[in-house]
C-alpha cells in the first residue's frame, strides 16, 4: 500500500481575536483535518497560533456538533427538540417572521448577530437580510465602543504604526490586554524585540496575568484608574523635560493647556487613585520618556469600564507627549480597522436600509426582550429573532433579564449555531451551521494589516449549512430576495468585494493567500498630521461629536456631558460600597474564546472550574478559605463559585476568568448575571470589568 503524504492547505482563523492568524491546515490521509499551524510566511502570524485553535479538529469533529435542523417540542428552554428537514425549518421561520410582521410591523423582527465568525460574508450578510425586510437594526456595543472611541478621539482614525514594528522597538508597553491569552502574536513580536534588541516589556493590568509574568516591569492597578496613571506619567514627562516640545507644537491641539492641567496630577495624586506606589509611577514615566522607540500596545480590557473611553484616550495621549510616533518601533497602536476600506455593499446592501428604522442596542438585549420602553425606543416589542454567530444567553450582561426575555412564550427565536449553546437551548428552531473550514470567507486583521482568504478546505458533514445559505433561503421565502447579493455564492461575494475595493480578484487571492495593506510609514505614524481636520492629535476631544466608527446612532449616551475635557481620572465607575465591598473584573480565559471552546474537553480541563480569585487578606476578612464555595452577588443577581487565594491584586479587587456555561456554576447562573448593561459614555457599551459585588461563604 502506498502511503500518501498528508496534504496541506490554508485558511485564516475566523474567531473574534485581533490576531486573525494565517493558518496552515493539515489534511490527513483519510481527508480529515489534522493539526492547524500558524503560517510561517505571514509576517504577523510568524508561525505561531494559540493552542485552542491548533487543536481545532477537536471542535470540528466534536460529538455534540449540531447536525440537523431542530424544532422545539417541550416548553421553552427545557431543551427538548425534534429533527425536521431544512425545508420545513426554513418554511417555519419564514411563516413566523411574516406573522410577527403582520401583527407588529417589520421592526418587531430583530436579527441579532456578532463575531462568532469574523468572515466578512458569513458575518455581515445578515445586514442585507435585515435591510431587505426593514427589520430592526443592531447597534454593536458589546466589545469595541469605548476602546475605539477613546483612541479615535485622539488620533482621528482607527489605525496606527505597523504592528510588526513591535519587533524593532526598544520598549513595548502592553496596556490593558493579556495577549498570552487573548492575542498571542503580540507576545511573539514583543519577545523578538527583547531577544534581538534587549527591549523592555512593561505590562499594565489589574492582576498578575500570564502576560505580566513575562514582563520586565508589571504595574497592577485598581480597575478603571488607568487615566490617572496616564496623567501622572505625562505630568512627570513635562516636569522632567522628557516631553518633546517641538513635536507637541507641531502635532497636537493644545499642549500648553495640557501641561497646565497636568500640573496637579502628580504621582502622589495618582498613587492614591490607582493603588500604585509613587516610585513605580516615577520609574515607568522616566522609562517611557527616555526610550524613544516605545511602542504602546493598548488593548480592550482597560476600556471595559464605564469610564473606559477616557482611559483609552488618556493612555494614547502619552505617545503625543513623548513624540514616540516619530520613530520606527514607536507610537501607539490599538487596532487597524480603518486601513481596509472594503466595499461591502453587495454583502450588506446599505441602500435598502430604511432611514427611520430603529437601532436596538446589542448589550441591552435583556431589557429589549423584557419590554423596557427606553430600550425599545418606544417602538414595537421584539417578537421574532434570527440569531447567528453569538451566544447572548452566556455573553450578554444583565443575564437574569436576558433569560427572562428568552423564556417569553410570545417570542419566536431561530438560532443558527454549531453547538447547542445556552442560547440555542432557548430557541424554537435551531439550524446547524458549518464551521470555518467548511465554508468560504475573507477576513481582515484588527491587530495587523492583512486581508486574508479562508477558503473552504473540507466538506461539512451532511446537515450543517453556512450563514449565507440560511439568509438567502429565508429572503427567498419572505419574498425579499430582489437584491443580487441574495443570489451569489460566498466565492462570488468575495470576488465582487475584492474587485470593487481595488484589491484584485479571488483567483489572485487564492494564489497569494493574503494581501498586506500596511500603509506607508509616514501615514501610519501620522507624520503628515493626525487624521482630524486640523491635522492634530486631540488632547481635548469633542466627545459628543467624535469621529468614532462606533458612534451611537441615537446620539451620545451615559453621562457624557460630564466627561473630562482633557485627560483626567473620571469617577464614572461602579464603585465599591459597604454592601458591595469588591470590584469584579471578568477577564477572558486563555482556553476559551468568549463562550466558544467552553464545549471542548481539553479547554474545560485546562480551565477546571469557575473561580473567583481574591487576596488572602480580603478573603479572610470575609471568613473565606482557599477553595471555599462562595456566593458572589449584587443587585442584579447571585452566582456561586469557588474562591481561590492569589497574589498580585490590589485590595478590594476580585477576578473571575472566562465565560463558562451558566450550568458550570453550582447555582446555574453564569458570570454575566452580575455585569451591567447600562451604557458607558459617550457611545454605550457594556462595562464587563467594572462591577461592584459582595462575596460571602455559602
Ligand atoms: N483566550 C481568549 N482570547 C480572546 C478572547 C477570550 O475570551 N479568550 N476574547 C476575544 C475578544 S472578543 C476580544 S475583544 C479580545 C480582547 O482582548 P484584550 O484586549 O486582551 O481585552 P480583555 O480580554 O477584555 O482584557 C484584557 C486584560 O485587561 C485587564 N483589565 C481589566 N480591567 C482593567 C483596567 O481597568 N485597567 C487595566 N490596565 N487592565 C484591565 C484584564 O485583567 C485582562 O487581563 O480578545 C479576544 N481573544
Ligand atoms: N463577563 C464577560 N462577558 C463578556 C466579555 C468579557 O470579557 N467578560 N467579553 C465580551 C466581548 S469582548 C464579546 S466580543 C462578546 C462575544 O460574545 P459572542 O459574540 O457571543 O462570542 P462567542 O461566545 O464566541 O459565541 C459565538 C458563537 O458563534 C458561533 N459561530 C461561530 N461561527 C459561526 C458561523 O459561521 N455561523 C454561525 N451561525 N454561528 C457561528 C459559535 O459556535 C459560538 O457559539 O462577549 C462579551 N461578553
Ligand atoms: S491567536 Fe486568535 S487569531 Fe490566532 S489562532 Fe488563536 S484565536 Fe485565532
Ligand atoms: Mo470582543
Image (cartoon, helix red, strand yellow):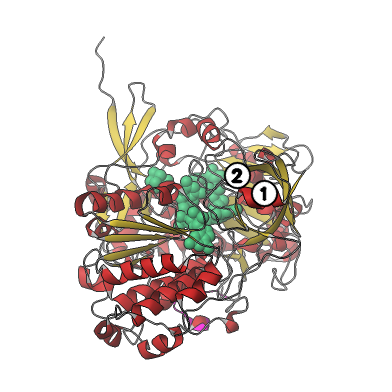
The residue carrying pointer 1 sits among few (fewer than 14), some (14 to 19) or many (20 or more) residues within 10 Å by Cα, namely many
- Return the mark for residue 607: none
Task: Indicate the position of residue 462 as horizontal and vertical percent values.
Answer: 50, 30
* Residue drawn at 42 percent across, 55 percent down: 120
Decide: is 348 above or below 495: below
Name the side, left or right, on which 333 lies relative to 102: left
Task: Indicate the position of residue 399 as horizontal and vertical percent values.
Answer: 69, 54
Name the side, left or right, on which 357 lies relative to 495: right
Name the side, left or right, on which 350 lies relative to 694: left
Determine whether the residue tagged by mark 1 lies in a helix, strand or loop. Answer: helix
Extent of the magenta region: 544-553
The number of numbered discs placed on residues in the rendered structure image is: 2
The residue wearing badge 2 is 645
Sequence order check, earlier mark of 2 and 1: 1
Determine whether the residue tagged by mark 2 lies in a helix, strand or loop. Answer: strand
Instruction: Kindly check if marks 2 and 1 are in contact, taking CB atoms under 8 A apart as contact.
Output: yes
Decide: is 546 above or below 623: below
The answer to whether residue 551 is magenta is yes
Report if residue 467 is visible in the image.
Answer: no
Q: Tell me if the residue at label 2 has its CB under 8 Å from ligand 1.
A: no
- Locate the N terminus by quadrant: top left
Report if residue 513 is visible in the image.
Answer: yes
Task: Indicate the position of residue 271 as horizontal and vertical percent values.
Answer: 51, 70
| Magenta segment main secondary structure | loop
* Residue drawn at 28 percent across, 52 percent down: 189
Q: Quadrant of residue 107?
A: bottom right
- Locate the C terminus by quadrant: top right
The residue wearing badge 1 is 619
Q: CA distance from mark 2 to mark 1?
A: 8 Å
Q: Nearer the viewer, residue 451 or 697?
A: 697
Amino acid at each position: 500500500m502506498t502511503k500518501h503524504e498528508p496534504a496541506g492547505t490554508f485558511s485564516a482563523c475566523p474567531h473574534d481575536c485581533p490576531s486573525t492568524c494565517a493558518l496552515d491546515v493539515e489534511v490527513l490521509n483519510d481527508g480529515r483535518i489534522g493539526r492547524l499551524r500558524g503560517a510561517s510566511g505571514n509576517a504577523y502570524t510568524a508561525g505561531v497560533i494559540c493552542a485552542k485553535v491548533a487543536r481545532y479538529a477537536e471542535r470540528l469533529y466534536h460529538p455534540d456538533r449540531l447536525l440537523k435542523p431542530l424544532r422545539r417540542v417541550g416548553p421553552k428552554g427545557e431543551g427538548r427538540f425534534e429533527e425536521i428537514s431544512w425545508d420545513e425549518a426554513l418554511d417555519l421561520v419564514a411563516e413566523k417572521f411574516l406573522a410577527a410582521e403582520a401583527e407588529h410591523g417589520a421592526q418587531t423582527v430583530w436579527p441579532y448577530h456578532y463575531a462568532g465568525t469574523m468572515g466578512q460574508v458569513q458575518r455581515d450578510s445578515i445586514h442585507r437580510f435585515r435591510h431587505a425586510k426593514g427589520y430592526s437594526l443592531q447597534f454593536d456595543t458589546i466589545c469595541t465602543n469605548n476602546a475605539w472611541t477613546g483612541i479615535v478621539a485622539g488620533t482621528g482614525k482607527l489605525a496606527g504604526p505597523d504592528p510588526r514594528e513591535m519587533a524593532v522597538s526598544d520598549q513595548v508597553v502592553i496596556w490593558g490586554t493579556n495577549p498570552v491569552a487573548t492575542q498571542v502574536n503580540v507576545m511573539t513580536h514583543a519577545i523578538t524585540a527583547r531577544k534581538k534588541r534587549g527591549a523592555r516589556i512593561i505590562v499594565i493590568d489589574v492582576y498578575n496575568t500570564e502576560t505580566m509574568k513575562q514582563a520586565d516591569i508589571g504595574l497592577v492597578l485598581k480597575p478603571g484608574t488607568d487615566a490617572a496613571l496616564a496623567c501622572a506619567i505625562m505630568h512627570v514627562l513635562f516636569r522632567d523635560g522628557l516631553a518633546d516640545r517641538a513635536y507637541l507644537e507641531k502635532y497636537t491641539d493644545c499642549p500648553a493647556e495640557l501641561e497646565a492641567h497636568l500640573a496637579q496630577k502628580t504621582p502622589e495624586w495618582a498613587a492614591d487613585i490607582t493603588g500604585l506606589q509613587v516610585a513605580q509611577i516615577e520609574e515607568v514615566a522616566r522609562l517611557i520618556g527616555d526610550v524613544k522607540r516605545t511602542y504602546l500596545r493598548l488593548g480592550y480590557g482597560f476600556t471595559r469600564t464605564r469610564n473606559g473611553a477616557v482611559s483609552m484616550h488618556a493612555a494614547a495621549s502619552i505617545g503625543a507627549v513623548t513624540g514616540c510616533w516619530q520613530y520606527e518601533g514607536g507610537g501607539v497602536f490599538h487596532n487597524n480597522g480603518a486601513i481596509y476600506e472594503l466595499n461591502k455593499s453587495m454583502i450588506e446592501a446599505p441602500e435598502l436600509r430604511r432611514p427611520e428604522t430603529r437601532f436596538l442596542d446589542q448589550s441591552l438585549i435583556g431589557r429589549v426582550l423584557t419590554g423596557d420602553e427606553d430600550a425599545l425606543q418606544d417602538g414595537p416589542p421584539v417578537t421574532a429573532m434570527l440569531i447567528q454567530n453569538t451566544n447572548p444567553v452566556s455573553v450578554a450582561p444583565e443575564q437574569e433579564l436576558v433569560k427572562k426575555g428568552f423564556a417569553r412564550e410570545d417570542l419566536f427565536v431561530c438560532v443558527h449555531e454549531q453547538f447547542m449553546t445556552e442560547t440555542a437551548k432557548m430557541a424554537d428552531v435551531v439550524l446547524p451551521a458549518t464551521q470555518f473550514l467548511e465554508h468560504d470567507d475573507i477576513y481582515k486583521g484588527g491587530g495587523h494589516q492583512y486581508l486574508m482568504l479562508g477558503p473552504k478546505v473540507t466538506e461539512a458533514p451532511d446537515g450543517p449549512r453556512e450563514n449565507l445559505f440560511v439568509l438567502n433561503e429565508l429572503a427567498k421565502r419572505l419574498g425579499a430576495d430582489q437584491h443580487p447579493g441574495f443570489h451569489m455564492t460566498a466565492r462570488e461575494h468575495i470576488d465582487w468585494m475584492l474587485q470593487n475595493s481595488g484589491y484584485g480578484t479571488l483567483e489572485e487571492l487564492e494564489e497569494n493567500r493574503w494581501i498586506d495593506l500596511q500603509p506607508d510609514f509616514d501615514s501610519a505614524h501620522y507624520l503628515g498630521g493626525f487624521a482630524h481636520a486640523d491635522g492634530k492629535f486631540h488632547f481635548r476631544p469633542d466627545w459628543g461629536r467624535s469621529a468614532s466608527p462606533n458612534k451611537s446612532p441615537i446620539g451620545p449616551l451615559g453621562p457624557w456631558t460630564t466627561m473630562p475635557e482633557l485627560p483626567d481620572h473620571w469617577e464614572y465607575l461602579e464603585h465599591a460600597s459597604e454592601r458591595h465591598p469588591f470590584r469584579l473584573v471578568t477577564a477572558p480565559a486563555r482556553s476559551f474564546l468568549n463562550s466558544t471552546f467552553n464545549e471542548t474537553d481539553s479547554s474545560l480541563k485546562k480551565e477546571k472550574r469557575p473561580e473567583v480569585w481574591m487576596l488572602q487578606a480580603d478573603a479572610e476578612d470575609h471568613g473565606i478559605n482557599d477553595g471555599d464555595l462562595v456566593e458572589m452577588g449584587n443587585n442584579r443577581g447571585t452566582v456561586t463559585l469557588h474562591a481561590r487565594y492569589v497574589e498580585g491584586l490590589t485590595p478590594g479587587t476580585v477576578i473571575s476568568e472566562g465565560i463558562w456555561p451558566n450550568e458550570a456554576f453550582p447555582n446555574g447562573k453564569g458570570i454575566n448575571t452580575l455585569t451591567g448593561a447600562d451604557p458607558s459614555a459617550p457611545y454605550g457599551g457594556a462595562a464587563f470589568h467594572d462591577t461592584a459585588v459582595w462575596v460571602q461563604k455559602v
